[in-house]
Amino acid sequence: MKENNYPKLHNATWPGIVGKGADSEPVIAFDTLLEMTAAAEVDGVKFDGIDIGLFDPHFPVDSSADGIKKLADKVASFNLEIGSLVAPIWPPSGGSAMGSKEERAQFVTQVRKSCQIAQQLRELGIRPNGVIRIDSASTPESWTKDPATNTKLIAQTFREAGDVAADYGEKLAAEGEICWGGMHSWKAMIETLEAVNRPNIGFQADMAHTLLYLLGYNSPADRILPADFNWNDRDALAAGLRTLTQALRPWTTDFHVAQNDGTVHGTGSHDKTGRHCLATDPNGKLDIATDAGYWLRDDKGALTKAFRHICWDGCMFPNEVMTQPKTWNDILASMVQVRQLHGWYE
């Protein structure tokens, strides 16, 4: 029997930027992240690719065609492919998806630029699959001032962005994270996606972030697990994950493997959101390989094969941790376990 080779296993580059900077730790260079990703190996298995954030200082969204070609050549030189991209839709270059007409236009413009890069990377043969990630670029606090109107505005902006993406043959995925207004709870996320109603706009699930959906952070009325939940009750946690994934899985077009200890965390200028933990963190509440199956299999346990690649997301780890080879080998080992349990061979 041949080893599963799908979904492909990707690392992410944006954890070298998110939560870093002047008010935190130095940004980790793009090339350093490439080198560490390519160097990781577990029993002969290596990462297949990387997912990339299209923002300074790693790779600016205004890069030229020549710059895009150089990016493709650089990634290929490490024997890696490129998967999903993150559009830099936040102010000041972008704008709130529920903001003024001008802000929403800026949002759509940044999506268009991201789609142009995505298309060129496909044409260069370095990006065989993947989506473009977006969010509302708005806080839950500002959204709650007028939920109905703000959801309508977000949906309108997303539709316009989706129509642009369709022109380039691209799909968009809205990030399920508690720090984004209109997608800060699982019910709000579904309401937003239903209002968008575009076939090329779906949901990006991150195991660390979606765990916080169960607890109702920023939306207590939408919590699935009780306030006094005992994390040792695996049956109750499994039931909660089934409820969550049954609701969101049909929308899910991009998937991040991750660990969470049941708390929120923010570093630097990044708002508090689900804390990413190391794959081997003893305080992690998820059985990574088992719980990934709630997203990768349908309600009857059959593989959905909805994702050609899956990605590890570990934002806001200290630089000291992120520059240790063991960190990436442990992460890769968890990814391999996910593929062994829920993957397939082609």
Image: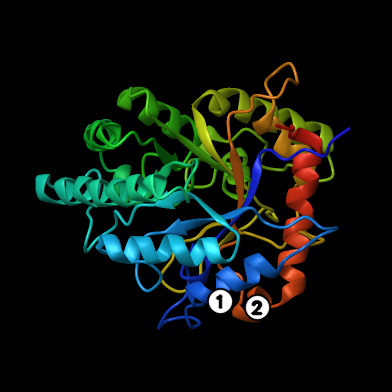
Q: Quadrant of the image for the C terminus?
A: top right
Report if the CB atoms under discs 1 and 2 are less than 8 Å apart. Answer: yes
Mark 1 lies on a secondary structure that is helix
Nearer the camera: disc 1 or disc 2: 1
Location of residue 101 by image quarter: top left
| Rendered location of residue 155, percent (x, y) | 28, 32
Front-most of residues 295 and 74? 74
- At a point 77% along the width and 63% down the height, the residue shown is 41
Q: Which residue is mark 1?
A: 32
Would you call the spot at circle 2 few (<14 residues within 10 Å), some (14-19), or many (20 or more)?
some
x and y, in percent, of residue 123 in the image:
37, 45
Q: Is residue 45 left or right of residue 298?
A: right
Q: Residue at x 62, y 38 (%)?
A: 214
Q: Is residue 339 left or right of residue 250?
A: right
Residue at image position (33%, 24%) is 198
Residue sticking out furthest to the left: 102
- Position of residue 128 measured from the top left corner of the image (x, y, whole percent): 50, 42
197 in relation to 55, above or below? above
- To which quarter of the image does residue 80 belong? bottom right
* Lateral position of residue 138 relative to residue 309, left or right: left
Q: Circle 2 — which element?
A: loop
